[in-house]
Image: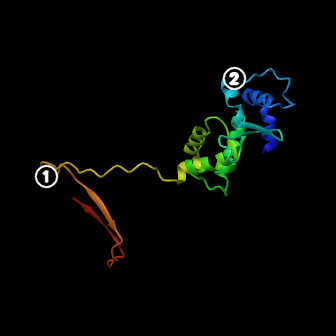
Amino acid sequence: MPDLIRAVYAHDDMCVALLRGLGSEEFKNSDKELSRRLRASLHRYTLDGGLLYYNTDPEDVARVVVPHDEELKYRIFYEVHDTHVSGHLGREKTYGSVSKMYWWPKLYKWVGTYVRTCETCQRTKSSPHAAAPLASLPVPTGCWQSISMDFVFGLPKDKAGNTGIVIFL
């Protein structure tokens, strides 16, 4: 994965500007300039072995900066979320796993979208929304205006071997 990330840096203007700003020999002749915002946060980035690292807290481990490339991001999500080892974790746990190793702008939003649109998760995980409460039926004003039916199963077998009944009200 590091080689793939390193190769994609050349196609991302922000990464090229950061690499040039940090003194990368490979991008020293690039015309990409650091924006005012990037220049102000340049102290959070480091360069090691051709990879950009991002760190907000000196006590934490620096994370690899992932360039803006959807295919690369989806590949990272696949490895962290979709494989048999990862187990299709929810948004928070997937974010925790990805953010330990990688960083890119709006990472949390990307994780939320990916997990919410994961086909396997949609089919197999229960909805976090509560089921609608049961509502009372209106009381009929006359005979035969409302007919209800119900099935009851799990009863002891009768002589014919039946274990259920149908009830009409």
Q: Name the residue that disc number 1 marks.
A: 143
Q: Is residue 118 above or below residue 105?
A: below
**Residue 134, label in figure:** none
The nearer-to-camera label among 1 and 2 is 2
Q: 41 left or right of 31?
A: left
Q: Could you tell me which quadrant the C terminus lies in?
A: bottom left
At which x and y percent is residue 59? 67, 47
Few, some or many residues within 10 Å of mark 2 (<14, 14–19, 20+): few
Q: Could you tell me which quadrant the N terminus lies in?
A: top right
Who comes first in sequence, dot 1 or dot 2? 2
At which x and y percent is residue 76? 70, 45
Amino acid type of the residue tagged 1 in the rendering: Cys
Q: CA distance from mark 1 to mark 2?
A: 78 Å
Looking at the image, do the residues carrying marks 1 and 2 touch, with CB atoms under 8 Å apart? no
Residue beneath the point at 38% across and 51% down = 131
Residue beneath the point at 76% across and 38% down = 46
- Corner quadrant of residue 110: top right
At which x and y percent is residue 130? 39, 50
Residue beneath the point at 27% across and 50% down = 135
Q: Name the residue that disc number 2 marks.
A: 35
- Corner quadrant of residue 103: top right
